[in-house]
Amino acid sequence: MEVRRTAPVKLDVPDQRREDFHESAQQFLYCANHAAEFCWDTTDYTNCVTSNSKARDALYDDLRAETDLTANLVQEAIRRAVQATKGCVERWKQGKCVSQPEFTSWSMVYDKRSATFYRNKVSLSTVNGRVECGFELPSDSPTPYEEYVLSEDFEFRASTLQYDPVDDEFYFHITTRKFDADGSDSENTEVSADTEHQTVLGIDLGVNSLAVASTGRFWNGDDYDHWCREFEKRRGEMQQRGTQAAHNALLRLGKREAAWRKQYIHTVANEIVTEAVEHDCDVIVFEDLTDIRERLPQAKWHHIWAFRRLFEYVEYKAPERGIAVEQVEPQHTSHRCSRTDCGFTHGDNRHGEHFECQKCGYEVNADYNAAKNVGIRYARKEQHRLRSSPKSAGGDAPVDVRVNGGMLNGESYQPIAGD
Ligand SMILES: [Zn+2]
């Protein structure tokens, strides 16, 4: 199976080169929006361009001539627009309201030809030649960078450079992947543009792992928990002192904590959206969070806060990449067997992080099982809706859930009472 990791790394950008990145990001946005304009057709989705090679053939030379970006940055900007268009076309086909994708946020995609890694720095293409940036890494070793980027087992994948205007810093979200012994690759080939196809990414939120995707990717949130506890400890100490100075320090700490929390959740949200983009998903599905407090009595307030924020951020960011965000009823997702030929639901199926179906014996990580169920539940509902809609071409439109190593079809899911 495929293992994918993203290590967010703060870059040390030389002062005199910061403007080169800002200018590059402007031009990258220009290319992406120009390509989105080219790909879009307001009258009929069949006229929209959803083939990367078609868009590249039509746009590449002009965009190279018009901008100072390198070949690979131009190509990634076009690819981003095509991906977003593809997602919009899929939703248009389902009768959902769509408009031409528009890119506004500061974000650039680097591939292995536009980014070169060294032990303590990375060299990145800009409009003004390459810029070498050092890393600001945490002191404890091995850092995620050492583990997942420098390791020979991991292969560099397209990664996103982002700028945080609040603290005026650049962050490189470095994505790498490796394969297990069997060498299988869960990435699929391009989804053909002429089928009524929908691909779903299911997300489970929880206490053991902050978020788990149906592709098998985990955001374990250990560092989130760790720092929340540290902040809490510091707060407790300051409250005990009770002086005016301690009170002021407490306020400052509160601000710092709020900023840190937001940054953390933003990063995870971006990675979830990227996971969906890279697996050609059209929809990201979460559980409804309304009764989350009751359902997860062991969750602390900072967990609940993180779940709600994470959903909000993904809901806000995903449409920019042409991906919809939906919610499903949360009942039984953690106790139900996610094998579509089984679906047995029982409280004894789950023990902590371990899931073992009492009927078919399927054993798997409990959060991964739940993430699959979230995706399957949405796929089944959508399949049902399409079949009963008079506008639909009939029951032929498949809705698939992207899982580790392949796809599950919503059709084969056995419904249970009350489901
Ligand atoms: Zn089972």
Image: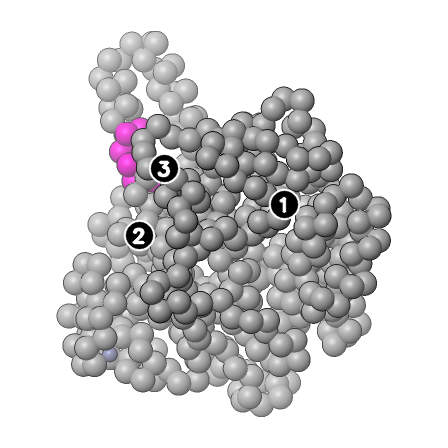
The residue that appears at 27% across and 73% down in the rendered structure is 336
Task: In the rendered view, tell whether residue 117 sits above or below residue 379.
Answer: above
Give x and y (percent) for residue 264. Answer: 43, 40
Q: Report if residue 225 lies within the magenta region.
A: yes
Please report the bounds of the magenta region as a residue range: 224-231
Front in this rendered view, residue 353 or 55: 55
Spatial separation of the CA atoms under disc 1 and disc 3: 23 Å
Structure colour scheme: one colour
Q: Earlier in the sequence, mark 1 or mark 3?
A: 1
Amino acid type, mark 1: Ser
Q: Earlier in the sequence, mark 2 or mark 3?
A: 3
Q: Is residue 246 visible?
A: yes
Quarter holding ligand 1: bottom left
From the image, tell me which residue sits under label 1: 114
Q: On the picture, is 90 further left or further right than 144? A: right
Q: On the picture, is 73 further left or further right than 200? A: right
From the image, tell me which residue sits under label 2: 209
Front in this rendered view, residue 254 or 48: 48
Give x and y (percent) for residue 172. Answer: 53, 40
Label at residue 143: 3
Front in this rendered view, residue 101 or 154: 154
Q: Main secondary structure of the magenta part?
A: helix
Q: Quadrant of the C terminus?
A: bottom left
Image label count: 3
Q: Nearer the viewer, mark 1 or mark 3?
A: 1
The residue that appears at 30% across and 67% down in the rendered structure is 369
